[in-house]
Image (cartoon, grey):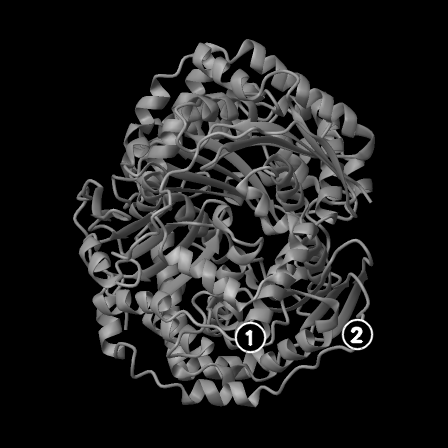
């Protein structure tokens, strides 16, 4: 059905047994390569006594090698415009490097040292054990992590996968240097590891570099790895588990999970479509029924968890306690009747969405390398392309047969986290028959014929290095189009930045309510009909209200067409809602606020921003005004929407194989060439007086959080580049400014800083998770480091590394036409001309240590640091 030009990676086995995969077919416009090294070890190579040793080894590998210190490892990669990171899964320890192609040899040499010749410094081992125990507490504060940990224990009961990747406090405390060195020796062997490289590079040169750095002499002497096989056993029973955390969280969480054999048999490959069936599409019957029709859930996600032997399919929902019965019943009914909910047209929508996901995956060497290495690791070389082709060639009848045989009859585990008992009679689930009838009776005559869709989704070989320079086209006094034509692109994007957002609210919450209502019901179509219309066209859109703008985004495979653009325009022209939808939107926004309060980072982030911007238009952010939602009526939404459509400035950002500016300017009649109010201002008034505050929020978290920061440059400020460099130096691991608070003192598990430029001004904050007894000391150390930087500024070497990284990150981002058009559209939105986009590299290159120090001191002077403390419950 689909003619796809798949990337054809080359697989090799070195003489010593190392599996190597090279995918060098990427466009030369991608300025970097991705490298993923995987060792086959994890829960299935651990015991109860050393549980967590794989994750602990990941931490210790970055403490230096026999040749390089921990600082050398990161600084060598960063100084060449790259980045390095590591991760642990239930069955692998991975190291990832992103690097420009010309430095591939240097990256492989550093990777060889890091992975194969670690130093295992005794004092660092003891420090990291304490940090890992703090990390365990951190994850206990996330309700979704709690539920998923329990679900894995249930689905893999009595097997190695029922243990936790982090281990236990007892098992991690007992680890010694000998345990770690022996474990590394046993499992970091050539035949037990894989190396994958993706990007634009010469395969022969890459192969020679690998042989030089990963040949026979590079590896430690090894014994034969021992591995468990108990994860191969399926748990064929239905069981329910409860986690009671009354008062700790604001919502209930419910998850179901079932396993399926990990193999290349078709009936098991088909399970990769299940996330699309359950919740990945707007027209997913289960998601629509629970979220849009009955407003029963705040959020719902479906995932396929790759593991050796048995994969796990999970569905996770969050909801108010009163909805518990309805949610659990609806999910159970859906699983029992899954085949009835998947019509032939919906099945085609699933394939279109899968194809678009694949297109976006293969254009990015980093994403593709990660997927390719995972498939090679779990299913073997060549499995990735085989799976993609199998799924796109899958026939509807075969998929329905799979649903009936393997999903509707599945034995699944259930885990519910109960935050509070229901305060009123539980809302019951409604019958599923009416929705099934609606799906079967839906009229698809308004969508393109199946044959037309197939022709549009054929992928062809594109000419290389043919992307055109960005265009900025002024349509009228209030509308500008930023267009990028990229013949190599296989899909098209559209982003609208409409001046508005929270800063233009009439009442706190009206912007968030509009974002919930928009794109659902229109004057001519019901909510569910609109969802099916967009999914059947292969158009996926979303809208959100940010502090400065109302943002609408859409993506489609292939080109934008007049018919697709007209459909998107109809969402604006025919925007409609009723009283029931208004109530549901208000409830959804309230649930969003509850989700923020349940999230460790979001609570800290919004708590700090609310205090920093309380005297500005951003003070109308709904997080600080939840009670105001009850005062918002239908007229308030229409008044705010009228302002959005008549916004004084709209930036359209479009990318496609041929540009698409003409289609957008001619097709968006609902927004283009509308008159703006006479008193409306297209520009933002720069600067604001930020308060200095010391505040506390009492939470139910197990850990404490400190957030310290100040005001920062606005998006259009000439100080932005200097402040970005300061933030990089403070936050980045190689810079070792803030990171030293973790590394040298062991005061916190997680610490970083962030700079957020906005229209009225910017925000800068440092964030750290720590225990109650270390909170004050951590806070003092952060203030001490920031004050020292404000007084001394960066060293020449620190700034040089920061400039290299900032420029490379910018180049990497804009190498994708979709990302480049969005970024250009954002610059045009704030500046009206996009000058900052084109001048970014030059602005960064011109920085000096003196300029960075002066700019940082200007916004974050000693004694003007604000602090927010999230106290443990």
Residue 460 drawn at (x, y percent): 20, 59
Q: Judge left or right: residue 157 versus residue 549.
A: right
* Whether label 2 touches label 1, CB < 8 Å: no
Residue 552 drawn at (x, y percent): 40, 56
Q: Quadrant of residue 430?
A: bottom right
Q: Judge left or right: residue 633 versus residue 394.
A: right
Mark nearer the N terminus (2 vs 1): 2
Secondary structure category for the residue under label 1:
helix
**Extreme-front residue of the structure:** 678
Residue nearer the viewer, 504 or 737? 504
Q: Circle 1: is it few (<14), some (14-19), or many (20+) Cα within 10 Å?
A: few
Q: Quadrant of residue 21?
A: top left
Q: Residue at x 30, y 43 (%)?
A: 24
Question: Disc 2 designates what residue?
Answer: 424
Q: Residue at x 56, y 78 (%)?
A: 406
Secondary structure category for the residue under label 2:
loop
Q: Can residue 184 be seen by looking at this rendering? A: no
Residue 138's tag is: none
- Image quadrant in which the C terminus is located: top right
Residue 459 drawn at (x, y percent): 24, 61
- Image quadrant in which the N terminus is located: bottom left
Q: Residue at x 81, y 56 (%)?
A: 247
Q: Can residue 133 be seen by looking at this rendering? A: yes
Residue nearer the viewer, 94 or 837? 837
Q: Circle 2: is it few (<14), some (14-19), or many (20+) Cα within 10 Å?
A: few
Residue nearer the viewer, 783 or 268? 783
Residue 386 drawn at (x, y percent): 38, 63
Task: Give the alpha-carbon distance from disc 2 to disc 1, as whole Å.
Answer: 23 Å
Residue 579's tag is: 1
């Amino acid at each position: 059905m689909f003619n796809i030009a798949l990337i054809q990676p080359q697989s090799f086995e070195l003489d010593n047994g190392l599996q190597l995969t090279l995918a060098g077919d990427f466009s030369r416009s991608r300025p970097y390569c991705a490298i993923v090294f995987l060792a086959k070890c994890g829960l299935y190579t651990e015991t109860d006594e050393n549980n967590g040793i794989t994750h602990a080894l990941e931490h210790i590998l970055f403490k230096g090698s026999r040749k390089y210190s921990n600082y050398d490892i990161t600084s060598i990669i960063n100084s060449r415009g790259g980045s390095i990171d590591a991760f642990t899964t239930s069955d692998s320890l991975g190291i990832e490097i992103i690097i420009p192609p010309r430095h591939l040899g240097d990256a492989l040499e550093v990777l060889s040292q890091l992975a194969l010749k670690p130093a295992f410094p005794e004092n660092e081992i003891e420090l990291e054990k304490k940090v890992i125990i703090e990390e365990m507490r951190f994850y206990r504060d996330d309700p979704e992590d709690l539920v998923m940990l329990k679900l894995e224990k249930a689905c893999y009961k009595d097997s190695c996968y029922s243990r936790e990747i982090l281990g236990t406090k007892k098992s991690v405390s007992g680890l010694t240097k000998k345990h770690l060195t022996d474990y590394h020796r046993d499992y970091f062997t050539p035949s037990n590891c894989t190396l994958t490289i993706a990007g634009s590079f010469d395969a022969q040169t890459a192969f020679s570099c690998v042989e030089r750095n990963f040949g026979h002499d590079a590896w430690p002497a090894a014994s034969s790895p021992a591995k468990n096989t108990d994860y191969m056993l399926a748990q064929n029973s239905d069981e329910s588990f409860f986690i009671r955390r009354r008062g700790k969280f604001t919502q209930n969480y419910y998850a179901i999970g079932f396993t399926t054999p990990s193999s290349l048999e078709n009936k098991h490959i088909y399970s990769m479509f299940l996330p699309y069936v359950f919740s990945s599409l707007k027209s997913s019957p289960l998601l629509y029924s629970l979220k849009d029709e009955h407003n029963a859930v705040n959020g719902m996600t479906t995932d396929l968890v790759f593991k050796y032997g048995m994969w796990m399919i999970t569905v996770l929902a969050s909801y108010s306690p009163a909805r518990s019965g309805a949610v659990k019943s609806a999910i159970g009914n859906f699983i029992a009747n899954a085949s009835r909910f998947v019509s032939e047209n919906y099945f085609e929508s699933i394939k279109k969405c899968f194809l678009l996901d694949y297109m976006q995956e293969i254009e990015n060497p980093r994403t593709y390398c990660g997927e390719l290495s995972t498939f090679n690791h779990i299913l073997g070389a060549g499995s990735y392309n085989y799976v993609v082709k199998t799924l796109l060639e899958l026939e509807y009848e075969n998929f329905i047969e799979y649903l009936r045989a393997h999903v509707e009859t599945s034995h699944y585990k259930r885990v519910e986290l109960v935050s509070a008992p229901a305060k009123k009679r539980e809302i019951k689930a409604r019958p599923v028959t009416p929705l099934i009838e609606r799906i079967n009776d839906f009229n698809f005559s308004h969508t393109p014929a199946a044959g037309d869709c197939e022709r549009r989704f054929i992928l062809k070989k594109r000419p290389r290095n043919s992307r055109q320079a960005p265009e900025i086209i002024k349509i009228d006094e209030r509308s500008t189009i930023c267009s990028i034509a990229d013949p190599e692109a296989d899909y098209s994007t559209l982003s609208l930045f409409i001046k508005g957002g929270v800063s233009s609210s009439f009442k706190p919450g009206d912007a968030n309510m509009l974002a919930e209502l928009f794109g659902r019901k229109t004057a001519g179509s019901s909510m569910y009909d609109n969802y099916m219309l967009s999914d059947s066209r292969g158009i996926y859109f979303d809208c959100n209200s940010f502090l400065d703008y109302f943002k609408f985004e859409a993506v489609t495979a292939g080109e934008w067409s007049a018919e697709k653009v007209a459909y998107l325009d109809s969402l604006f022209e025919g925007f409609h809602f009723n009283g029931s939808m208004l109530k549901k939107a208000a409830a959804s926004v309230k649930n969003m606020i509850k989700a923020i309060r349940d999230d460790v980072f979001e609570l800290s982030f919004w708590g700090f921003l609310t205090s920093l911007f309380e005297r500005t238009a951003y003070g109308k952010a709904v997080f600080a005004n939840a009670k105001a939602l009850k005062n918002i009526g239908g007229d308030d939404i229409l008044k705010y929407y009228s302002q959005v459509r008549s916004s004084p400035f709209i930036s359209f950002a479009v990318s496609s194989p041929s540009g698409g500016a003409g289609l957008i300017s001619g097709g968006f009649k609902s927004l283009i060439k509308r008159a703006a109010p006479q008193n409306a201002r297209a520009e933002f008034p720069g600067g604001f007086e930020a308060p200095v505050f010391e505040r506390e929020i009492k939470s139910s978290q197990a850990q404490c959080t400190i957030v310290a920061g100040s005001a920062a440059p606005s998006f259009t400020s000439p100080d932005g580049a200097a402040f970005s460099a300061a933030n990089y130096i403070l936050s980045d691991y190689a810079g070792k400014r803030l990171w030293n608070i973790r590394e040298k003192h062991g005061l916190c598990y997680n610490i970083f800083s962030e700079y957020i430029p906005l229209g009225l001004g910017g925000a800068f904050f440092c964030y750290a998770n720590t225990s109650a007894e270390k909170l004050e000391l951590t806070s003092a150390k952060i203030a001490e480091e920031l004050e020292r930087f404000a007084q001394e500024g960066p060293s020449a070497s620190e700034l040089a590394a920061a400039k290299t990284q900032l420029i490379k990150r910018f180049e990497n981002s804009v190498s994708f036409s979709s990302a480049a058009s969005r970024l250009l559209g954002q610059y045009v939105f704030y500046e009206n001309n996009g000058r900052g986009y084109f001048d970014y590299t030059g602005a960064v290159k011109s920085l000096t240590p003196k300029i960075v120090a002066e700019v940082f001191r200007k916004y974050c002077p000693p004694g003007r640091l604000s602090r927010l403390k999230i106290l443990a419950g």
